[in-house]
Every structure is written in structure tokens, then in C-alpha cells.
Amino acid sequence: MPSIFVCNLGNNKYIAQVTEDGVRLLCGTEEVQRLNLDLTSDIKFATVADPYLCLLTEEGYVVLLTLEGERLITTFTQLHKVCNFHFGFSRL
């Protein structure tokens, strides 16, 4: 599966490779951890702020991965359940 995002974590000790269905954590060429996230839609966007890696799926699920030691810990939420924005315009 092709990568949609690749970044360094842990002060450049690790490489995180994001694909549409999961994340691989590498140390050099050695795979340290593989996360198959079993999401209902593909990952479409990823961004990093070491030690955090944030993923967004096509259906609005947000996955926050936190590097703790040599492992990525996951937190899931759905965007529309966290944010309730109103983009309507009022008439003056």
C-alpha cells in the first residue's frame, strides 16, 4: 500500500509511515510496530508535532497517536462529536 504521509518521531529516532488503513513505526529499516486501525474509511490526511501524529479519515474520524517509549498509543474520536460549528449566515 502506498504511503500518504511519512514523518520522523522521537527526535528523529523513528519513522512513521501512514497508509490509507494504518501506520508503521520504523527504527531505521526495522519495523517496531504496525497499527492496522480497522477504520470504516480511509485515512486522508496526517500531520505531526513530535511526539504526536494526528490522522483524519474520510468520514471525519480523528486518530491521535502519541509516541510513548517505543510504542504509538491511539486515541479515537469523531470530528462532528467534538466540534459543533455553524457555518450559516444571518441576515442583517
Image (tube, rainbow, N blue to C red):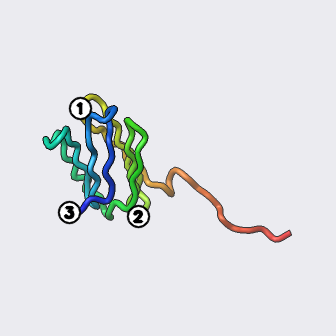
Q: Position of residue 56 (x, y in %)?
A: 40, 56
Q: Quadrant of residue 5?
A: bottom left
- How far apart are the two marked residues, 3 and 1, measured between alpha carbons? 24 Å
- How far apart are the two marked residues, 1 and 2, measured between alpha carbons? 29 Å
Kindly identify the amino acid type of the residue bearing the numbered disc 2.
Answer: Glu
User: Nearer the N terminus, badge 3 or badge 2?
Assistant: 3
| Residue at 34% in and 42% down | 65
Mark closer to the observer (1, 2): 1
- Location of residue 43 with respect to 69 vertically, above or below: below
Which residue ends up furthest to the bottom in the rendered image? 91
Circle 1 is placed at which residue position?
70
| Residue at 18% in and 42% down | 33
Q: Which mark is residue 1?
A: 3
Task: Choose between 35 and 1: the one closer to the eye.
Answer: 1
Q: Is residue 54 left or right of residue 33?
A: right
Q: Quadrant of the N terminus?
A: bottom left
Q: Quadrant of the C terminus?
A: bottom right
| Residue at 30% in and 38% down | 73
Circle 2 is placed at which residue position?
59
